[in-house]
Amino acid sequence: MTLKDASRIYSCPHCCKKQFKKKGFYYRKISKTYIPRYFCKICKKYFSTRTLSKTYRQKRPDLNLQVFNYLTSGVSLRRTAKKLKCNYHTVYRKFLWLSARAQTLHLSQNFYINELQIDEMESIEHTKLKPLTIALAVSDEYEILGVRVGTIPAKGFLSEISRKKYGPRNDESRKIVKDLLKSIKVHPKGQSILIKSDSKPSYKNVVRQVFPHNTHEVHVASVNKEKRREMKYLNSEKKVYDPIFALNQRMAKFRDHIKRLTRRSWCTTKIKENLEKHIYLYIADNNKYHLI
Ligand SMILES: [Zn+2]
């Protein structure tokens, strides 16, 4: 890096040459200071001590941590803006910036795992007529290894209404699960891992294609829905061993800590891509990445 000290300039950040001169100032509102500008004589570009900063061009870098904390603690974007007394668009821009950083950090991580659990959960895109599926991979150490969001067609009596109003909707479930499994890099390379999932038929083939030499354990729910409901009221549900507990527990946390995934709420995802971005933000919190 060319800027060793934030207060001193050693060379041009664009071409790394040292032939530059001072050229005016600009006022930085947040720190109430004048920042000197420089002009490179070689590449004819302007720069300052802020050029290589992580928060370059941000007007409210002081809000980054607070926005991150709110958005991973079950607060909506609009509510965050209200509580921080700033504009919604400030929060939205920070949401995009933070999630991009979280995604880059996540993709650069090496995971040393012995066990991998995969499953899907459902959400909606503005209306129940446009459901989404979220494929999630979690290690037995409660680390989230990856996430993918895709569309699925509406089910039951809503399917007819959905088709009439919005046309046919693709089922991307299989594709995103395959994509997710492919994205998981196992360290050290070639190490055999145990893959656990529920009994959805498509998982079997996908796992065999992506991890051909690893063991795949399929877990079928031991009791039916009514029995489970009964057990819930008798408080004996928690005593039943859950082989994919790490994953189910992370999913329950998603529903609590990501506002747009809460049930019976008016806060819903409006843009499909932003749901994945929001989950990356939560992954950064869950896996303890140094985002800011
Ligand atoms: Zn230069």
Image (tube, rainbow, N blue to C red):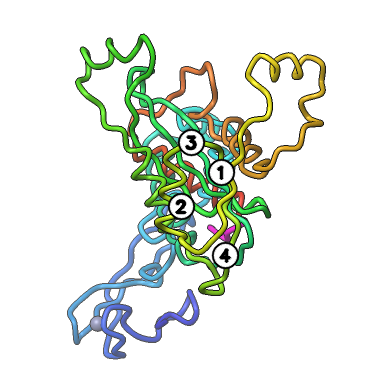
Q: Earlier in the sequence, mark 3 or mark 4?
A: 4
Q: Residues within 10 Å of mark 2 (few under 14, many from 20)?
A: many
Front-most of 22 and 262? 262
Q: Closer to the N terminus: mark 2 or mark 1?
A: 1
C-alpha separation, residue under disc 3 versus residue under disc 1: 8 Å
Kindly report which numbered mark, 4 or 1, lies closer to the viewer in this rendering: 1
Three-letter amino acid code at the position of disc 3: Lys
Quadrant position of residue 156: top left
Q: Is residue 81 above or below residue 160?
A: below
Query: Tag 2: residue type?
Result: Val
Q: Which residue is mark 2?
A: 207
Judged from the image, the secondary structure of the residue bearing numbered disc 3 is: loop
Give, as a three-letter code, the residue at label 4.
Answer: Phe
Image coordinates of residue 132 in percent, x first then y, are: 39, 30
Identify the magenta region.
288-292
Mark number, residue 197: 1
Circle 3/circle 4 CB separation < 8 Å: no
Q: Which mark is residue 200?
A: 3
Cα–Cα span, label 2 and label 4: 19 Å
Tell me which numbered mark, 4 or 1, is placed earlier along the sequence. Answer: 4
* Residue lying at 46% horizontally and 17% vertically, measured from the top left: 266
